[in-house]
Amino acid sequence: MRRFAVPAFNWSAIDWVSLVALSLLVLVAARIGERLSFGSRGLAAFLTALLFAAGFAGWSYFALHETIAQGIAMVMPGNPG
């Protein structure tokens, strides 16, 4: 049996702002979809998908990533040097 070396995972390559923001968007969309569906799983999934799609389009079109990243940089400046 051959063993292949697994490449090291580069954690710094992850865009953490987008990851957290889009994860929160999914959470909020799921909660709203659940509340608006009145117990129907199919309708909840459909509404969640629509809400997430609208949120993601807004995230992409209005360049919210840069705005949020700049806001975080103002609140938590990095260490110089």
Image: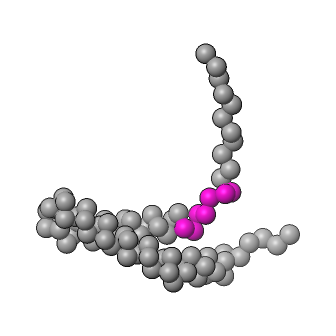
Residue 27 in sight here? yes
Residue 46 on image: x %, y %? 25, 65
Please tell me whether residue 2 is drawn above or below residue 30 in the rendered image.
above
In the image, the segment drawn in magenta is: 12-18
- Residue shown at 53% from the left, 63% from the top: 19
- The residue closer to the viewer here, 81 or 43, is 43
Assess whether residue 13 is covered by the magenta stretch.
yes
The residue drawn where x is 65% and y is 23% is 3
50 in magenta: no
Its colouring scheme is one colour
- Above or below: residue 3 compared with residue 65: above
Question: Residue 80: x and y, percent?
Answer: 82, 72
- Percent position (x, y) of residue 27? 37, 65
Determine which quarter of the picture holds residue 41: bottom left
Secondary structure character of the magenta stretch overall:
helix
Q: Position of residue 57 (x, y in %)?
A: 44, 76
The answer to whether residue 75 is visible is no
Q: Quadrant of the C terminus?
A: bottom right
Which residue sits furthest right?
81
Which residue is situated farthest in the top direction here?
Answer: 1
